[in-house]
Image (tube, rainbow, N blue to C red):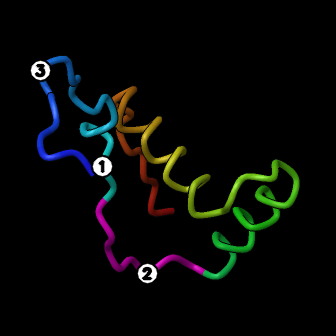
Amino acid sequence: MKEEYDFSKARKNPYTNKLKKQITINIDADTIDYFKSQSKFSGIPYQTLINLYLSDCAEKKRQLQINWN
């Protein structure tokens, strides 16, 4: 191990803006089953798929449209 390291040419981690935060959320079993089936089809973990879907909604600033009929 070196006595001293030179970080003068280091660059900032480009992924620091995309850090994930663990939360607890209640999701219907049918919804989880849907994303799990999509996971088997795509090969992407279902939690990642849920995150991608929600991130896409937030990025595109989609507004909720709820009908209580």
**Residue 38 lies in quadrant:** bottom right
Local packing at callout 1 (Cα closer than 10 Å; few below 14, some 14-19, many 20+) is few
Of badges 3 and 1, the one in the foreground is: 3
Q: Position of residue 59 (x, y in %)?
A: 36, 30
Residue 8: numbered disc: 3
- Whichever of labels 2 and 1 marks the residue nearer the N terminus, that label is 1
Determine the residue positioned at 33% across, 36% down. Answer: 15
Q: Which residue is mark 1?
A: 19
Magenta-drawn stretch contains 24: yes
Q: Is residue 68 above or below residue 30?
A: above
Measured as percent of width and height from the top left, residue 5 is found at: 16, 36
Relative to 19, say whether 62 is above or below: above
Label 3, label 2: how many angstroms apart (C-alpha)? 46 Å
Residue ID at (39%, 33%)? 62
For the point 51% across and 76% down, which residue is it? 27
Tell me the mark number nearer the camera, choosing from 2 and 1: 1
Q: Which tag, 3 or 2, sits closer to the chain's start?
A: 3
Which x, y percent locates residue 16?
Answer: 25, 39
Q: What distance separates the C-alpha of mark 2 from that of mark 1?
A: 22 Å
* Amino acid type at image mark 1: Leu
Q: From the viewer's perspective, is residue 58 above or below residue 7?
A: below
- Which segment did they paint magenta? 21-28
Q: Residue at x 31, y 73 (%)?
A: 23
